[in-house]
Image: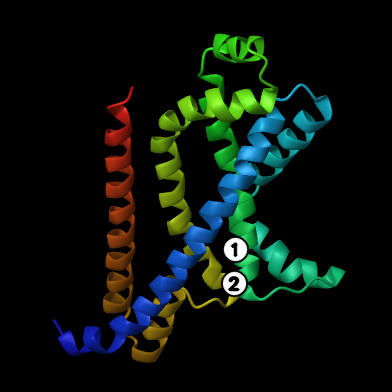
C-alpha cells in the first residue's frame, strides 16, 4: 500500500467531502420544509392544495434526480435563469427530497388516531394548532427511521452533483483518477469516506430513535 498516495490526495477528498456534507445538510433542511408543506397540503380539505401536492410528488418521484438536476442547471438558462453548480444542485436535491419526505410525513401523520384531532378541535384548537401541538409531536417519533434512511440516501445521491461540474467527493475522486491513473486507490478512498459519513448518520439516527423509544 502506497501511503504517500493517500497522504497527498486525502486532503483533496476531504475538501470534496465537506462540500458533500454541506449539500446534504442544505438539501435535508429545505427538503424537510418542502415535505412538511406538501404533506399538510395533501391531507388538507382543499382539493386544489391536494391536487398541487399530488402533482408535485407524482412528477418528482416519477423522474430521475439526474434529469431534474440537468433541467435546473442546463435547461433553466434557456429561460434566462442561470444558476451556479452548487445552488442548482441544492435546489434540485431539496425539491427531490421534499417529494419523498412529504410521503414519509403524511404516512406518519395518518398513523395517529383520528380521535386525537377531533379531541383537539373540540377543545377549540384550530387545525394548525392541533397539528403543531398534538399531532406532529406524536408523529415525529415515528418518522425518525424512514427520515434517517432518506437523508442517508440523499447523501449518497450527492454524487450526481458531479455531473454539474461541482467538485464534491465523487468528482474529486475522478480528478485524482485522471491525474494519477490510479482508479483503485482513488475510488476506494472515496468509498471509505462515503461509508464513514453514512455510518455516522446511521449511528446518530439510531441513538435518536432509541432515546425517543423511551417515551413511547
List x then y, in percent, for residue 54.
72, 33
List x then y, in percent, for residue 160.
53, 64
Which quadrant holds residue 14?
A: bottom left
List x then y, in percent, for residue 89.
60, 65
In front of the other: 181 or 23: 23
Q: Is residue 43 visible?
A: no
- Residue at far right of view: 79
Vertical placement of residue 47 versus 202, above or below: above
In front of the other: 130 or 22: 130
The answer to whether the residues at label 1 and label 2 have Cβ atoms under 8 Å apart is yes
Residue at 60% across, 15% down: 120
- Residue at far front of view: 124
Residue at 78% across, 67% down: 76
Q: CA distance from mark 1 to mark 2?
A: 6 Å
Which residue matches tag 2?
A: 86
Which residue matches tag 1?
A: 90
In the picture, which quadrant includes the N terminus? bottom left
Residue at 51% across, 19% down: 111
**Is 81 displayed left or right of 92 in the figure?**
right
In front of the other: 160 or 101: 101
Dot 2 lies on which element?
helix
Vertical placement of residue 5 versus 174, above or below: below
Amino acid at each position: 500500500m502506497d501511503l504517500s498516495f493517500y497522504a497527498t490526495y486525502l486532503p483533496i477528498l476531504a475538501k470534496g467531502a465537506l462540500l458533500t456534507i454541506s449539500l446534504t445538510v442544505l438539501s435535508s433542511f429545505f427538503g424537510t420544509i418542502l415535505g412538511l408543506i406538501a404533506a399538510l397540503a395533501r391531507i388538507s380539505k382543499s382539493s386544489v392544495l391536494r391536487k398541487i401536492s399530488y402533482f408535485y410528488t407524482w412528477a418528482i418521484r416519477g423522474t430521475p434526480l439526474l434529469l431534474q438536476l440537468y433541467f435546473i442547471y442546463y435547461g433553466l438558462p434557456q429561460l434566462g435563469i442561470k444558476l451556479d453548480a452548487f445552488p442548482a444542485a441544492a435546489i434540485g436535491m431539496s425539491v427531490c427530497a421534499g417529494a419523498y419526505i412529504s410521503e414519509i410525513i403524511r404516512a406518519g401523520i395518518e398513523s395517529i388516531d383520528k380521535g386525537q384531532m377531533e379531541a383537539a378541535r373540540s377543545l377549540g384548537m384550530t387545525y394548525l394548532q392541533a397539528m403543531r401541538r398534538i399531532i406532529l409531536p406524536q408523529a415525529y417519533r415515528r418518522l425518525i427511521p424512514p427520515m434517517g434512511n432518506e437523508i442517508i440516501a440523499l447523501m449518497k445521491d450527492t454524487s450526481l452533483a458531479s455531473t454539474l461540474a461541482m467538485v464534491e467527493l465523487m468528482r474529486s475522486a475522478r480528478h485524482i483518477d485522471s491525474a494519477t491513473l490510479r482508479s483503485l486507490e482513488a475510488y476506494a478512498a472515496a468509498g471509505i469516506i462515503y461509508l464513514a459519513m453514512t455510518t455516522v448518520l446511521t449511528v446518530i439516527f439510531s441513538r435518536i430513535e432509541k432515546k425517543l423509544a423511551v417515551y413511547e
